[in-house]
Image (cartoon, coloured by chain):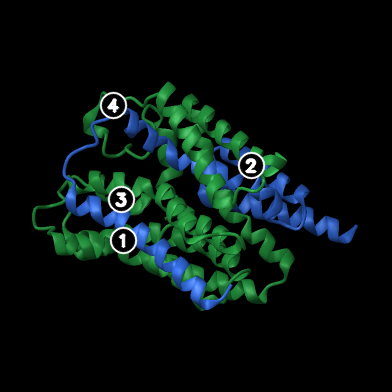
């Protein structure tokens, strides 16, 4: 990617993000009235993260196998009550282990 | 409320951000040089949004309009937090200060600020965002530099950390709140369809994420509207479906920016 495209992408990204924070912070004092839209906004973070993770995680490592193992390991670790960093470490070690073994084979 | 108290309270967030942004730096170093990756973190201060942004930049077919729409939807929750926070701040927290400090509205800084008993002053809020900002930027820098030096087998393993953290945010909420579980499964099914159904594979990554999140969230809101009977705690669980707060909070409290 060339520097010019990067600058435009960055400008769009940072600009939109800033306006989303600043405009309501400065202007709005009241609550969003509609229960439907508040519910919608409540679900957005989780559905976004889920859509970003699956299936992209399968293709983020050397092999689909290590990516899939990382996802399974992370879900199990999370279900067992591990925190953010704990789950991340489990995912990393899983990839390192699986890819390491496959390199040796 | 003092600046120094804010700095103190922000320390754990700063440490967490360093770890999260390290893996963003690694992911970014595959596409950009380290100063450019670091600059994204310094100007955005958001994990999921930056990560999606990076995916769009990496996509040869990615467009500016796609970037704008993806960033808009992924970061829309900050608007909600900003609205909520605007009702918690001290009267002295004027428009100028709000414009200056709005960048500090992240999941964790927001959560910590609104959980204070006293009205939030600009000094306290500024103190609160100092270490998270430094942690986020320096973590990205370290990750991006290491990404250029370390062998692929190691960076691949470290790069998966970000996904691990996404899992750690989503899974506790899925476990505690069944409608979230359903919405998340819909989003995943939809996302897989974009990847594996040939007719849909022409859709770029950014739009696919937007469409999946829209469909799943709209269905969630239509069939399982969140409870809003307790207005006193509404500010704290505004970004997550209520009724699942305790479990959601453990994941959220150390969540990425």
Secondary structure beneath dot 2 equals: helix
Q: Residue sitting at 50 percent across and 33 percent down?
A: B216
Question: Which residue was labeled with disc 3?
Answer: B110
Secondary structure beneath dot 4 equals: loop
Secondary structure beneath dot 3 equals: helix
Q: Earlier in the sequence, mark 2 or mark 3?
A: 3
Question: Which residue was labeled with disc 4?
Answer: B228
* Chain B tint as drawn: green
Tell if the residue under mark 2 belongs to the same chain as the one under mark 3. yes
Residue B58 is marked as none
Q: Residues within 10 Å of mark 2 (few under 14, many from 20)?
A: many
Q: Disc 4, disc 3: CB below 8 Å?
A: no
Q: Please identify, in this view, whether the residue under mark 2 or under mark 1 is nearer the observer.
A: 2
Relative to B249, does residue B86 appear above or below in the rendering? below
Q: CA distance from mark 2 to mark 3?
A: 34 Å
Q: Earlier in the sequence, mark 4 or mark 3?
A: 3
Q: Is residue A90 visible?
A: yes
Question: Which residue was labeled with disc 2?
Answer: B194
Image quarter (top left, top right, bottom left or bottom right) of the N terminus of chain B: bottom left
Q: Residue sitting at 49 percent across and 39 percent down?
A: B213
Q: Disc 1, disc 4: CB below 8 Å?
A: no
Question: Which residue was labeled with disc 1?
Answer: B103
Q: Earlier in the sequence, mark 1 or mark 3?
A: 1
**Residue B211 or B19: which is nearer the viewer?**
B211
Q: Residues within 10 Å of mark 4 (few under 14, many from 20)?
A: some
Q: Please identify, in this view, whether the residue under mark 4 or under mark 3 is nearer the observer.
A: 4
Q: Is residue B169 visible?
A: no
């Amino acid at each position: 990617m060339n520097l010019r495209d990067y600058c435009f992408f960055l400008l769009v990204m940072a600009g939109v993000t800033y306006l989303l924070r600043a405009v309501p912070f400065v202007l709005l004092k009241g609550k969003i009235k509609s229960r439907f839209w508040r519910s919608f906004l409540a679900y957005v973070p989780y559905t976004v993260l889920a859509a970003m993770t699956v299936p992209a995680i399968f293709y983020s490592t050397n092999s689909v196998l290590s990516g899939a193992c990382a996802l399974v390991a992370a879900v199990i670790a999370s279900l067992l009550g591990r925190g953010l960093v704990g789950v991340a470490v489990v995912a990393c070690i899983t990839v390192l282990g699986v890819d390491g073994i496959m390199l040796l084979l | 409320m003092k600046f120094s108290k804010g700095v103190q309270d922000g320390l754990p967030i700063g440490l967490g951000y360093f770890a999260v942004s390290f893996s963003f730096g690694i992911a970014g170093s595959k596409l950009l040089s380290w100063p450019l990756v670091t600059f994204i973190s310094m100007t955005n201060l958001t994990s999921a949004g930056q990560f999606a942004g990076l995916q769009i930049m990496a996509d040869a077919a990615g467009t500016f309009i796609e970037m704008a729409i993806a960033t808009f939807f992924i970061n829309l929750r900050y608007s909600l937090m900003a609205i909520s926070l605007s009702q918690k701040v001290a009267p002295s927290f004027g428009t100028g200060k709000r414009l200056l400090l709005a960048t500090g509205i992240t999941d964790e800084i927001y959560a910590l600020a609104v959980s204070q008993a006293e009205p939030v002053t600009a000094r306290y809020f500024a103190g609160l965002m100092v270490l998270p900002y430094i942690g986020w930027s320096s973590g990205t820098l370290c990750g991006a530099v290491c990404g250029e030096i370390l062998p692929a087998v190691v960076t691949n393993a470290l790069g998966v950390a970000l996904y691990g953290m996404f899992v750690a945010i989503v899974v506790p909420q899925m476990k505690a709140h069944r409608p979230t579980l359903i919405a998340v499964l819909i989003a995943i099914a939809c996302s897989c369809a974009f990847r594996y159904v040939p007719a849909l594979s022409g859709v770029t990554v950014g739009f696919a994420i937007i469409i999946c999140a829209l469909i799943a969230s709209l269905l969630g809101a239509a069939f399982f509207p969140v409870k809003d009977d307790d207005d006193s705690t509404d500010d704290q669980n505004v970004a997550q479906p209520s009724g699942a707060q305790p479990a959601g909070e453990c994941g959220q409290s150390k969540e990425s920016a």
